[in-house]
Amino acid sequence: MDRIRRLGEPGDLGWIVLANGELYAKEYGWDISYEGLVARIVADFANSYDPEREAAWIAEVDGRRVGSIACVAAEEEGTAKLRLLIVDPAARGRGIGGRLVDTCIEFAREVGYRRMKLWTVSVLTSARKIYQSRGFQLVGEEAGHMFGHDLVGQDWALDL
């Protein structure tokens, strides 16, 4: 059985870091700098998130963690950031990524954000398709050397 629950069980934060580090190294050959970035995002969330305006979720299949997403406040007033979307390869094709994104957007609307933004890289085509299908628009791109590779970073935004 699939379910999406609020982050908060022991091991959730560590799982997000582990899953991202392993998955992106295996699928894209990304180096440890990506896992370090995820660890910083997770640590910042754990140490200073505002439960009235920020949240994270874990997707489970048969009680096993298979995905995550987070909604955090952006620097700009009234803007949320979608972060940490990941779905385990074994759980793909079940609509979990879309449900996680929908959960994040719904939360952002409920707590009063007017806009949501996210940053991704162009090679993550499945995630980009989910974002586009929810109305996100590409608002900027920049090529650079990240995570041991030449990649194109992308900024996406959605008016809520």
Image (cartoon, rainbow, N blue to C red):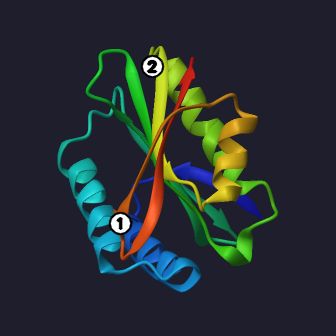
Residue projecting furthest to the right:
93
Q: Residue at x 25, y 52 (%)?
A: 46
Q: Residue at x 47, y 14 (%)?
A: 114
Instruction: Report helix, strand or loop for mark 1.
Output: strand
Q: Is residue 91 left or right of residue 81?
A: right
Which of these two is toward me, 84 or 51? 84
Callout 2, which amino acid?
Val
Disc 2 or 1, which lies upstream in sequence?
2
Question: The N terminus appears in which quarter of the rendering?
Answer: bottom right
Q: Residue at x 45, y 19 (%)?
A: 111
Which of these two is toward me, 72 or 32? 32
Res 157 visible: yes
Residue 142 percent location from the top left of the image: 42, 46
**Residue 38: numbered disc:** none
Instruction: Report helix, strand or loop for mark 2.
Output: loop
Foreground label between 2 and 1: 1
**Residue wearing tag 1:** 146
Residue 147 percent location from the top left of the image: 36, 71
Question: The C terminus appears in which quarter of the rendering?
Answer: top right
Residue 124 percent location from the top left of the image: 61, 60
Q: Give me the C-alpha separation between circle 2 and circle 1.
A: 33 Å
Q: Residue at x 66, y 37 (%)?
A: 102
Residue projecting furthest to the left:
47
Callout 1, which amino acid?
Met
**Residue 111: numbered disc:** 2
Asked where in the image residue 158 lies, by quadrant, the reply is top right
Residue 115 percent location from the top left of the image: 48, 20
Q: Is residue 140 left or right of residue 106?
A: left
Q: Is residue 114 left or right of residue 54?
A: right
